[in-house]
Amino acid sequence: MRPSKQKSRTLRRVFKKTPGGRTIVAYVKRKPKKLYCSNCGKELMGMKQLRPYKMASTPKTEKRPERPYGGVLCSRCTRRRIIESARMNA
């Protein structure tokens, strides 16, 4: 990459030690934003915060919780939705 491209704060600066003992500045892409519940807007727990190329190699079970609406709704909203649907059907 050209130095002018690295000067912008789009890339994160990480200080790394080389095998020779020198410390260099590595420019790394930033993490994507956190995921939020589509109903209440609360931050979702159990969701990986990775870039797409890393997300592709992680197992499916680590990407989102294994429950209904996992990765879309928070646990509280999921509980409410299930109770509501049970009341509608009963």
Image (tube, rainbow, N blue to C red):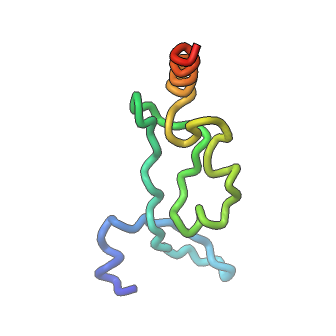
Q: Is residue 30 left or right of residue 87?
A: left
Report x, y in % for residue 77.
50, 25
Q: Is residue 28 left or right of residue 79?
A: left
Report x, y in % for residue 81.
51, 24
Q: Residue at x 48, y 69 (%)?
A: 28
Q: Residue at x 61, y 72 (%)?
A: 17
Q: Residue furthest bottom?
A: 2
Q: Residue at x 57, y 27 (%)?
A: 75
Q: Nearer the viewer, residue 38 or 23?
A: 38
Q: Is residue 1 above or below residue 68?
A: below
Tell me the quarter of the image containing the C terminus: top right
Q: Is residue 51 above or below residue 44?
A: below
Q: Nearer the viewer, residue 87 or 75?
A: 87
Report x, y in % for residue 73.
50, 34
Q: Is residue 16 above or below residue 20?
A: above
Q: Nearer the viewer, residue 51 or 19?
A: 51
Tell me the quarter of the image containing the N terminus: bottom left
Q: Nearer the viewer, residue 12 or 25?
A: 12
Q: Residue at x 56, y 37 (%)?
A: 69
Q: How many marks?
A: 0
Q: Is residue 28 left or right of residue 16?
A: left
**Among the 4 quarters of the image, the one containing residue 89:** top right
Q: Residue furthest front?
A: 89
